[in-house]
Amino acid sequence: MHRKLTLAFACACALIVALTIALFGPATLRAETAPEPEPTTTTTETDEEANAVPELSKWERQRMIDRYRHETWRWQRIMGRSVTRKLPNAPEVFAGRVEAWRKTAERLRRHANNPPHKSQWLCIRRYEGAWTSRTGNGFYGGLQMDLSFQRTYAPSLLRRKGTADRWTPLEQMWAAERAHRSGRGFYPWPNTARYCGLI
């Protein structure tokens, strides 16, 4: 709005000057006959310069990329995958690299939040116990995983966070998913898997 008003004011001034010259001649515009002073050079910002985004430092650029890269790594760790250090075919342009990492993080977030057998794990958990369950007989979490199971299918989680009762529900489901993919299916939960009609 400010730009439009400035432009309208400039046009009005130009019109007044043109009409004055046309009606009275160029001599009427000068109040005195002394020579015009030399123009002084001042540093004024143009509209483009005033609205321009300041140049980001290398550190600030890296922080923007790291935000999405660390989110990507978080979802990959939950799923038990190795982390992606560098995106294949990443654009050279900074904005393109940020967008590529953002899309990767978004895609992995959707995938991580929806394990392939999510409804089956939720059914088994309903019969097994709370996600934070820690029974005295050596079983932990909502899927009642023993220490051997945890060491085999989620060793990094066991080292980092302790037993499965301290893991998020997603982390527990993805550990179970790795066991399922290894060929064990739902057989580590023989009774509750039967209740759910899985075996």
Image: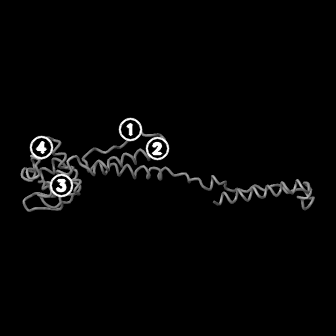
Side of 17 where 127 appears, left or right? left
Which of disc 1 and disc 4 is earlier in sequence? 1
The residue sitting at 14% across, 58% down in the picture is 126
> Label 1, on which residue?
88
Side of 189 where 29 appears, left or right? right
Name the element at disc 3.
helix
Q: Select label 4 or label 1 by which is in front.
A: 4
Identify residue type, mark 3: Leu
Identify residue type, mark 1: Pro
Name the element at disc 2.
helix
> Label 3, on which residue?
122
Which of disc 2 and disc 3 is earlier in sequence? 2
Q: Quadrant of residue 16?
A: bottom right
Which of disc 2 and disc 4 is earlier in sequence? 2
Q: Quadrant of residue 38?
A: bottom right
Q: Position of residue 169 (x, y in %)?
A: 22, 56
Q: CA distance from mark 1 to mark 3?
A: 35 Å
For this rendering, which residue is in front, 60 or 16?
16
Name the element at disc 1.
loop
Q: CA distance from mark 3 to mark 2?
A: 39 Å
> Label 4, on which residue?
184
Classify mark 3: residues with Cα within 10 Å, few (<14), some (14-19) or many (20+): some
Identify residue type, mark 2: Gly
On residue 96, the disc is 2
